[in-house]
């Protein structure tokens, strides 16, 4: 802990110098989107001031510099994820876009047929639910859902049953690495192994994991992995789809347009190689470069340091909230990133409104996980989600604000 | 008192409060005083669509006036609808239909509300007028 200088980290985030409702901002909505450090903002600004140009086709100086920066960003991201090659990194607009891309091309590939099964968990965000529902509707496949325990963790017995029941038919297992609503870390290692033994492809939603954990594609062995830039201190509108090279090579393109082609004629068109085959149109060049800068920023802090600091803050917050009468904390005690709770007799929306007035930004509602909320018989929760810059003062002010809000509503 | 007079009275009351917590406590208190809505009345068709919290609104016509009953699982929302009911309850459909809800801007309450919440207020006002419209013929 002593090696992690949280006040230095805080000073890297300009937004934290500003007040909300006349009070210093306590930002605890990192799971929705993270704040941006100066280093990332500088890169975005530098790009537009010095490099801005369309990439890959231009012969002029700026086009070459911008292309180089964009492709260097891809290399850095490939290294960060420990992908086996840089061609395995496809730029998307975010995790949602990545899941839609992969579900669409699996659909077009003819690999998903009537009677096949696509499995997700009850913890999934709507973005890792709805695209699969849509694919099932188009293909005649069935959607199966792995239930969760009362603690908000995967019901592994039920998962084993599901594997047995769907033997030979399971084509895709799509799971989040960390639940955005409850902070549950899923036991991906054994689940991915089981799914592979069953002959299924595995898609992992890493949107909540990449900001908190060091993720290694070789160790994880997922077939596809997506995440969003904006949740990991980079701008909105940029994200990554990682896919194993041989699988991506085998899959058809999705969006058509510039960049993704080799030769176009009215008689027929041939497509570009990886990764460009899946990147039609002018990409989010600045976003890609800023995403690489954000990952460098995070690596500079040390992901291990960041996650142990965040875990400590979330434990303190959980412990402070526990002392409030009628509180229910959701998810397991070893949660990562997000802390979800409700207070008996009080609407999450009311409490969220009141703590906002005290300068505390938390999320209220269903967190894009309506089926999970239904499972727990609630319309929503309050969620405090932590990032690298949150400190003890944030935890204390959260607890005080919640207590004050509860007092007003009781 | 007319609707406008009641609105002016509220603005006067609110101006006595020092800070936002007192204003919110006042609104929450109004919700607590609201006549209870029987559980059986909280039906799907009485739910106001589009709010983050659940809001049920029921209207009935008696002695030439429109009367409302409402409830919400959110105490702040319930307080806000109680505020509206205070102004409108027992008024003729015509008075309700011409009532000016823009006064809410002057209360300073709206600036304390998230856009989603402010939107819910507009929906509530609209629904109250809508229900009054159902009785407009009956008043003639």
Image (spheres, coloured by chain):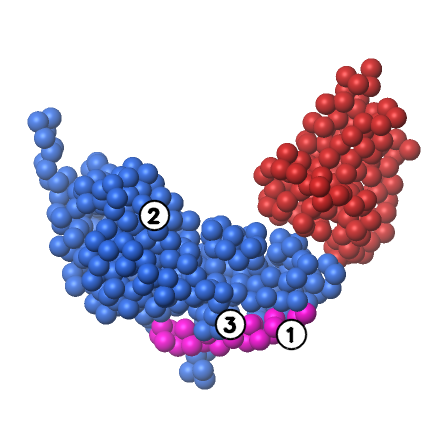
Chain colours: A blue, B red
**Considering the numbered disc 3 on the image, is that residue within a helix, a strand or a loop?**
helix
Residue B72 x %, y % = 69, 46
**Inter-mark Cα distance, 1 to 3:** 15 Å
The residue carrying pointer 1 sits among few (fewer than 14), some (14 to 19) or many (20 or more) residues within 10 Å by Cα, namely few
Instruction: Name the residue located 8 percent from the left edge and 27 percent from the top edge.
Output: A267
Residue A314 is marked as 3
In the image, A1 versus A408, the foreground residue is A408
Residue A323 is marked as 1
Chain under label 2? A
Chain under label 3? A
Residue picked out by circle 2: A143
Nearest to viewer (mark 1 / mark 3): 1
Q: Earlier in the sequence, mark 2 or mark 1?
A: 2
**Considering the numbered disc 2 on the image, is that residue within a helix, a strand or a loop?**
strand
**Inter-mark Cα distance, 3 to 2:** 34 Å
The correct choice, above or below, for A273 with respect to A234 in the image is: above
Residue A354 is marked as none
**Considering the numbered disc 1 on the image, is that residue within a helix, a strand or a loop?**
loop
Residues shaded magenta: A301-325
Residue A47 x %, y % = 32, 52
The correct choice, above or below, for A258 with respect to A190 in the image is: above
Quarter of the rendering containing residue B58: top right
Chain under label 1? A
**Inter-mark Cα distance, 2 to 1:** 41 Å
Would residue B66 appear left or right of A406 to someone viewing this image?
right
The correct choice, above or below, for A7 with respect to A285 in the image is: below
Residue B82 x %, y % = 78, 43
Residue A323 counted in the magenta span? yes
Instruction: Name the residue located 23 percent from the left edge and 51 percent from the top edge.
Output: A169
């Amino acid at each position: 802990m002593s090696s992690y200088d949280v006040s230095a980290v805080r000073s890297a985030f300009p937004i934290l110098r500003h007040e909300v409702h006349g009070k210093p901002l306590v930002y605890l909505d990192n799971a929705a989107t993270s704040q941006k450090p100066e280093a990332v903002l500088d890169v975005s600004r530098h790009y537009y001031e010095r490099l801005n140009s369309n990439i890959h086709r231009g012969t002029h100086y700026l086009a070459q510099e911008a292309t180089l920066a964009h492709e260097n960003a891809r290399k850095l991201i490939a290294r960060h994820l420990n992908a086996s090659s840089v061609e395995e990194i496809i730029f998307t607009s975010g995790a949602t876009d990545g899941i839609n891309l992969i579900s669409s091309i699996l659909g077009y590939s003819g690999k998903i047929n009537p009677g096949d099964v696509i499995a997700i968990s009850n913890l999934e965000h709507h973005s890792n639910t709805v695209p699969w529902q849509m694919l099932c509707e188009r293909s005649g496949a069935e959607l199966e859902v792995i239930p969760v325990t009362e603690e908000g963790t995967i019901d592994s017995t039920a998962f084993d049953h599901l594997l047995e029941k769907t033997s030979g038919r399971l084509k895709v297992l799509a799971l989040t690495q960390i639940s955005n609503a409850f902070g549950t870390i899923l036991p991906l290692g054994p689940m991915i192994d089981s799914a592979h033994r069953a002959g299924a492809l595995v898609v992992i939603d890493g949107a909540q994991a990449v900001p908190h954990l060091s993720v290694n594609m070789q160790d994880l062995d997922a077939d596809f992995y997506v995440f969003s830039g904006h949740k990991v201190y980079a701008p909105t509108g940029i994200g990554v789809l990682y896919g194993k090279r041989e699988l991506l090579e085998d899959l058809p393109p999705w969006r058509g347009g510039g960049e993704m082609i080799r030769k176009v004629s009215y008689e027929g068109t041939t497509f570009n190689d990886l990764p460009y085959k899946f990147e039609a149109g002018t990409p989010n060049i600045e976003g890609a470069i800023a995403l690489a800068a954000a990952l460098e920023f995070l690596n500079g802090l040390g992901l291990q340091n960041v996650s142990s600091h965040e875990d400590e803050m979330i434990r303190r917050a959980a412990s402070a909230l526990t002392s409030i009468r009628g509180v229910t904390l959701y998810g397991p005690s070893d949660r990562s990133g997000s802390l979800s709770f409700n207070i008996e007799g009080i609407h999450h929306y009311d409490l969220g409104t009141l703590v906002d007035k005290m300068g505390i930004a938390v999320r209220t509602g269903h967190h894009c996980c309506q089926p999970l909320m239904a499972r727990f018989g609630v319309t929503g929760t309050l969620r405090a989600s932590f990032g690298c810059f949150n400190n003890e003062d944030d935890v204390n002010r959260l607890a005080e604000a919640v207590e004050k809000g509860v007092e007003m509503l009781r | 008192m007319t609707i406008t007079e009641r609105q002016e009275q509220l603005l006067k009351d609110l101006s006595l409060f020092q800070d936002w917590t007192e204003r919110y406590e006042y609104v929450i208190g109004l919700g607590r005083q609201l006549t209870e809505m029987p559980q059986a009345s909280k039906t799907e068709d009485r739910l106001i669509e589009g709010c983050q919290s659940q809001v049920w609104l029921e209207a009935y016509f008696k002695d030439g006036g429109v009367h409302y009953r409402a409830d919400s699982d959110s105490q702040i929302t319930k307080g806000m609808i109680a505020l509206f009911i205070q102004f409108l309850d027992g008024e003729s459909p015509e008075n309700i239909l011409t009532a000016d809800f823009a006064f809410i801007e002057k209360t300073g309450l709206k600036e304390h509300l998230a856009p989603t919440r402010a939107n819910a207020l507009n929906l509530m006002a609209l629904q109250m007028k809508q229900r009054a419209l159902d009785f407009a013929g009956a008043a003639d």
